[in-house]
Image (cartoon, helix red, strand yellow):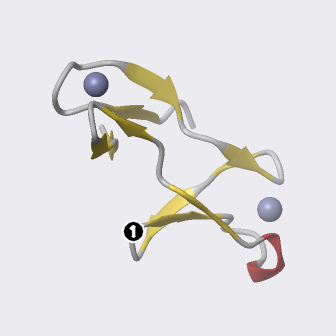
Amino acid sequence: MGQKLVCSVCGREQEVPTCCDQSMILKNGYLLCCCSKDCGYQPIPECCGKKMVYN
Ligand SMILES: [Zn+2]
Ligand SMILES: [Zn+2]
């Protein structure tokens, strides 16, 4: 809970997207719902031309 995505270039932070009331997890370069594969996946948000990272 309370995880954030941070831009490694400018330091901007944003909340990790949620699905099924839980933070999505990072897997194979995508964000996945940890509850069900049926929820699908989302691309990782980008900032400054780079994918944001979990801090
Ligand atoms: Zn940035
Ligand atoms: Zn879900």
The local secondary structure at tag 1 comes to loop
Q: Which of 25 and 42 is in front in this view?
A: 42
* Residue 49 falls in image quadrant: top left
Q: In this view, does 44 lie to the left or right of 21?
A: left
Q: Which residue is drawn at 40% across and 76% down?
A: 28
The N terminus: image quadrant? top right
Q: Nearer the viewer, residue 24 or 30?
A: 30
* Residue 42 falls in image quadrant: bottom right
The C terminus: image quadrant? top left
Q: Position of residue 46 (x, y in %)?
A: 40, 41
Taking the view exactly as shown, the residue that stands out farthest to the left is 9
Q: Nearer the viewer, residue 24 or 8?
A: 8
Which of the four quarters of the rendered structure image does ligand 2 lie in?
A: bottom right
Mark 1: amino acid: Gly
Q: In this view, does 24 lie to the left or right of 48?
A: right
Q: Where is residue 32 in the image (x, y as percent from the top left)?
A: 61, 66
Q: In this view, does 28 lie above or below 22?
A: below
Please tell me how many numbered marks the rendered image carries. Answer: 1
Taking the view exactly as shown, the residue that stands out farthest to the front is 49
Some atom of ligand 1 lies within 8 Å of the CB belonging to the residue at label 1:
no
Q: Is residue 37 above or below residue 14?
A: below
Q: Mark 1 points at which residue?
A: 29
Q: Is residue 41 above or below residue 18?
A: below
Q: Residue at x 20, y 19 (%)?
A: 10
Q: Where is residue 2 in the image (x, y as percent from the top left)?
A: 53, 30
Q: Which residue is drawn at 68% across and 64% down?
A: 33
Q: Where is residue 52 in the image (x, y as percent from the top left)?
A: 34, 42
Q: Mark 1 Cα within 10 Å, few/some/many (few <14, many 20+)?
A: few
Q: Residue at x 78, y 76 (%)?
A: 36
* Residue 50 falls in image quadrant: top left
